[in-house]
Amino acid sequence: MEKMSQAQIAIVAGTGIADLFNVKQFEEFNTSYGPSSLGRLRIGSRDVIILLRHGIGYTIPPHRINYRANIFSLKESGVKSIFASSAVGSMRRSMKPGDLVLVDQVVDFTKGRSQTYFDGESGKVVFTDVTNPYSDHLRHVILKATKKLHVKMHQKGTYLCTEGPRFETAGEIRLFRKLGCDVVGMTGCPEVFLARELGMDYASIAIVTNWAAGIAQKVTHEEVLEMMREKGPIAKLIIEEAISSIGEK
């Protein structure tokens, strides 16, 4: 399809979350950056667009996701607020597997991804302020939802994004810890930056699925999926409550 009917809120569903929303039909949205698949659902009084970050059937690895097409398709669909989720490994003993973290900062260690919409082709040079990349407003809404649901969540955390799809080495994790990072994942960048460039609020719930390399002796995708099956439904409830509370205003 060329254009989906307008909705001001979107969910970018990551590992273990996508299937929980049980959206039966997705349609292709064509952008100048490539196609994106979008679905629609109703949460409370709000029409919500859902985007499966890894594609329908979980077929796209993190380093091959077309982040620019995904975020641009949301902007073209009228989205102003994005609630995202992601699976992460923990580099801090205080953030154990099963915990939820409302990240407030990000460090980008990706290598080969298209990072911006402002690549100079328009003839203008644009610099975007990302001092605080995540929306304070949406983070407040999410924290309010956790209190209503009596769910514990770490209110802050620094997310380090790697290229993937391999997991990190123990040496890399030691470095990332020294940089002050708390959790590590593969999909947070450039997603958050692209949303900021297009003027959309963006917040992300990180679900700790495993200890990072060196803390754990071995990291496997199976343990990530197992933890997401346990904690994914809780993250879904938080997102739904947050969106419903926005609809009350």
Image (tube, grey):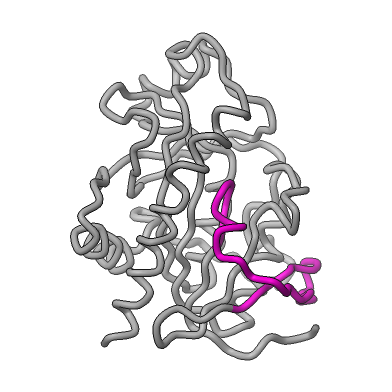
Left or right of 95, for residue 169:
right
How far from the left and from the top, in percent, is residue 190? 58, 51
In the image, what residue occupies the spot 55% across and 33% down? 224
Q: Quadrant of residue 162?
A: top right
Residue 90 lies, with reference to residue 7, above or below; the image says above
Quadrant containing the N terminus is: bottom right
Q: Residue furthest bottom?
A: 5
Q: Quadrant of residue 17?
A: bottom right
Residue 177 lies, with reference to residue 187, above or below; the image says above
In the image, what residue occupies the spot 53% across and 47% down? 188
Q: Quick one: 142 or 78, which is closer to the camera?
A: 142
Quadrant containing the C terminus is: bottom left
How far from the left and from the top, in percent, is residue 86? 51, 47
User: How many numbered circles does the render carry?
Assistant: 0
Left or right of 25, for residue 42:
left
Q: Quick one: 123 or 221, which is closer to the camera?
A: 221
How far from the left and from the top, in percent, is residue 69? 71, 65
In the image, what residue occupies the spot 28% across and 86% down? 248
- Write the start and end of the magenta stretch as one range: 12-40
Residue 22 belongs to the span the image colors magenta: yes
Residue 218 belongs to the span the image colors magenta: no
Q: Quick one: 169 or 57, which is closer to the camera?
A: 57
How far from the left and from the top, in percent, is residue 62? 68, 43
Left or right of 246, for residue 144:
left
Left or right of 7, for residue 55:
right
In the image, what residue occupies the spot 35% across and 77% down? 244
Q: Quick one: 81 or 100, which is closer to the camera?
A: 100
